[in-house]
Image: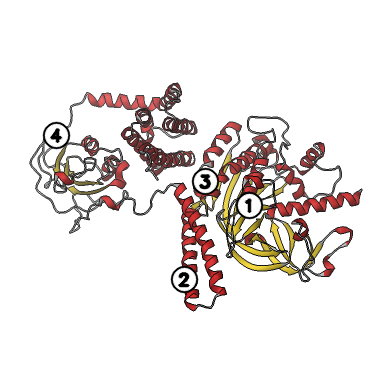
């Protein structure tokens, strides 16, 4: 497989920086006085600007530089990050992303308008600063007196700092703006010419700074590269400070070496008392090696992970065949090898599946901007709360889950959360609230979207369903069954059509997408208190634990996550009028005979077994001839020729080389419900 194009690498890294920048800006809306958030946003901007210039994205570098300049007063604390300013900054972030993704089609007029808006917000403070600077320029430049206080610095930059778009010389010049500096390059780390990499930085610097400043002022100079360097500094007393001319980066003889300085452990380390020099460490830490970077994580193309998962699936199938052959033979050594391969294959399967697992927080972060913009456009104050961000899900599931959650969150804000007047009339003093939660539940992940709005209007949903002919007037339905009409194509209870909703398009897509992921949707609501939508999803779409059953001569797989229990089918479980129910500890559970659904010929087994499955609150029994046992199921998709076969979600290969179809639990439950409804309508007639 060919290597990635360098510009594609930049786009991927920029995408991560955009997430960091957007998260910092959105957090500033809630915590405008948090300096760490401002610094985080500036570090992301600075890296985007430097990397953009290095990879030839000159428009990106130029626009980001103007963005930094306009936003610099926020970093200095001279402009407060208001909601309006954050909104413009988010628009600037979107424009930079557009410049990277489609530079040829991005309108520069939009960028100029965004920069004008930024400058308009910071103009009053910028004018005040310029006035102060003009007044200071008229004063004579201060010349440090002999023996004034200062700092001794030792700078060691990561060898890749130039590749990351930063220039140490620029940083030294910024340091000189604090006060006159005496700078001496240290060349002992420069290799021979044949070993020298042109894009690496090998120089170190010893700097004597003539300025009575605190450590925070020095930290501000290096705030954007703090993770790419080692800074050690020692405060100098008046007696220790050498006499130096106030020139910038002047050539001079090396300063006499001082005692080794103490590494800067943290930005908030306490300042030493005046005139006191801290005891220095006896030995300076070793500088970072170039090969130390990237050890913790490695960027891997998604296609390679998919290919690896396919190979592991084939290995699991081959291992099952080997185990079956070994079980049928009498050679002990073959059985021992088969057991060892089974253990290794299981370990490799778990490791590979773990590599595909991604924290769902990477998805949750995308919706903060969505809620922010919808709250502004609809003029509804909405608080967005997430939990369970560390819950891991297969990367394929993460990709498929994005659009359904967008629809659910938009509906919750547009339809669920009331406007300010309605909330006040209902006695609600708290703002609107959207909660997005993920939690593991057995072999499933439950993703919940909850709002504190007015809840679903069940009567209106029923009236709309009757109006569209989906149910007969007066039909006996539970509230949960009525709420399921929300997922019917073209169904909407909105009184008017807006830019956000009202056409009945979206919720049907949500249901179809979740069912294609072998998941299900539950809805619960409390009038006046809000609605909760829960998505029940399998952990992965690649390999699952399944229950292997036999119906006639065929073998089938039921996802084990949907199985509640297995019971014997008794003769008394057949009811009158053709309706079949099981009595499971006092509860009547409808059941389906798989022999009839699959149209199997021949007589049924005398002692049939019933597998109780469930999706949400609905339970259904599936009658089979035999329960064979658990099976590691490698899922293979069916071809397009079988797209009309709805009760099967895929197939797998068994240990003897034969195929087994995987039953679609959601479709089987829907089939059972439709049969019950048909029987009820026949009885009513």
Identify residue for label 2: 340
Separation (CA) of disc 1 from disc 4: 72 Å
Q: Position of residue 179 (x, y in %)?
A: 20, 36
Q: Nearer the viewer, mark 2 or mark 4?
A: 2
Q: Position of residue 482 (x, y in %)?
A: 77, 46
Are the residues flagged by discs 1 and 4 in contact, CB closer than 8 Å? no
Q: Earlier in the sequence, mark 1 or mark 3?
A: 3
308 lies left or right of 144: right
Separation (CA) of disc 3 from disc 2: 39 Å
Q: Earlier in the sequence, mark 3 or mark 4?
A: 4
Instruction: State the quadrant of the N terminus.
Output: top left
Identify residue for label 4: 246
Q: Residue, x 70% and y 48% (percent of image)?
A: 525
Q: Name the residue at the right extreme.
A: 685
Vertical order, 247 against 672 (above or below): above
What is the secondary structure assignment of the residue under circle 2?
A: helix
Are the residues flagged by discs 3 and 2 in contact, CB closer than 8 Å? no
Identify residue for label 3: 363
Q: Nearer the viewer, mark 3 or mark 2?
A: 2
């Amino acid at each position: 497989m060919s290597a990635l194009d360098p510009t594609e690498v930049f786009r991927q890294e920029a995408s991560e920086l955009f997430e960091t920048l957007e998260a910092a800006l959105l957090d500033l809306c809630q915590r405008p006085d948090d300096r760490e958030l401002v610094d985080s946003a500036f570090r992301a901007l600075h890296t985007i600007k430097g990397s953009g210039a290095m990879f030839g994205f000159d428009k990106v570098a130029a626009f980001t530089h103007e963005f930094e300049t306009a936003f610099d007063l926020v970093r200095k604390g001279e402009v407060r990050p208001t909601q309006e300013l954050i909104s413009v900054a988010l628009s600037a972030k979107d424009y930079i992303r557009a410049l990277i993704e489609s530079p040829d089609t991005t309108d520069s007029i939009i960028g100029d308008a965004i920069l004008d808006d930024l400058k308009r917000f910071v103009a009053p403070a910028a004018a005040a600063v310029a006035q102060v600077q003009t007044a200071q320029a008229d004063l004579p430049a201060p010349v440090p007196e002999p023996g004034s206080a200062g700092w001794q610095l030792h700078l060691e930059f990561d060898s890749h700092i130039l590749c990351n778009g930063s220039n140490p010389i620029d940083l030294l010049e910024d340091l000189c703006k604090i006060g006159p500096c005496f700078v001496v390059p240290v060349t002992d780390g420069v290799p021979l010419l044949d070993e020298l990499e042109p894009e690496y930085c090998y120089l170190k610097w010893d700097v004597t700074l003539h300025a009575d400043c605190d450590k925070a002022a020095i930290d501000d100079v290096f705030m954007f590269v703090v993770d790419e360097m080692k800074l050690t500094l020692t405060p100098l007393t008046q007696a220790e400070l050498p006499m130096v001319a106030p020139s910038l980066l002047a050539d001079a003889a090396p300063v006499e070496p001082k005692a080794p300085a103490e590494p800067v452990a943290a930005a908030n380390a306490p300042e030493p008392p005046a005139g006191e020099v801290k005891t220095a460490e006896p030995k300076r830490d070793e500088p970072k090696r170039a090969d130390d970077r990237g050890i913790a994580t490695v960027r891997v193309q998604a296609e390679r992970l998919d290919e690896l998962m396919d190979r592991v699936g084939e290995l699991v199938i081959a291992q099952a065949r080997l185990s079956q052959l070994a079980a049928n033979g009498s050679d002990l050594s073959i059985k021992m090898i088969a057991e060892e391969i089974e253990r290794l294959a299981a370990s490799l399967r778990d490791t590979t599946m773990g590599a595909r697992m991604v924290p769902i927080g990477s998805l949750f972060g995308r919706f903060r901007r969505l809620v922010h913009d919808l709250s502004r456009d609809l003029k509804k104050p909405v608080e967005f709360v997430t939990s369970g961000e560390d819950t891991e899900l297969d990367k394929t599931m993460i990709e498929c889950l994005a659009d359904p959650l967008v629809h659910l969150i938009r509906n919750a804000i547009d339809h669920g959360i009331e406007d300010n007047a309605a909330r006040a009339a209902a006695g609600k003093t708290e703002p609107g609230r959207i909660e997005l939660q993920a939690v593991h539940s057995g072999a499933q992940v439950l993703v919940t979207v909850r709002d504190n709005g007015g809840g679903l209007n069940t009567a209106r949903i029923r009236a709309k369903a009757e109006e569209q002919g989906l149910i007969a007037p007066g039909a006996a339905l539970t509230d949960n069954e009525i709420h399921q009409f929300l997922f019917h194509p073209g169904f909407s209870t909105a009184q008017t059509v807006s830019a956000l909703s009202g056409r009945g398009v979206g919720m049907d897509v949500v249901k179809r997408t979740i069912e294609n992921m072998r998941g299900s949707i539950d809805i619960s609501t409390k009038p006046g208190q809000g609605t909760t939508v829960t998505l029940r999803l399998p952990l992965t779409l690649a390999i699952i634990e399944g229950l292997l059953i036999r119906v006639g001569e065929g073998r089938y797989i039921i996802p084990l996550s949907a199985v509640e229990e297995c019971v014997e089918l008794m003769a008394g479980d057949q009811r009158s009028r053709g309706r079949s129910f099981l009595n499971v500890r006092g509860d009547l559970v409808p059941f389906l005979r798989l022999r009839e659904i699959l149209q199997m010929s021949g007589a049924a087994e005398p002692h049939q077994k019933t597998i109780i499955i469930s999706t949400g609150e609905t339970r259904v029994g599936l009658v089979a001839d035999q329960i064979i046992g658990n099976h590691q199921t490698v899922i293979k998709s069916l071809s397009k020729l079988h797209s009309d076969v709805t009760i099967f979600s895929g197939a797998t290969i068994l240990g003897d080389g034969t195929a087994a179809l995987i039953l679609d639990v959601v479709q089987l439950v829907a089939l059972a419900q439709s049969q019950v409804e048909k029987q009820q309508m026949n009885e009513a007639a």
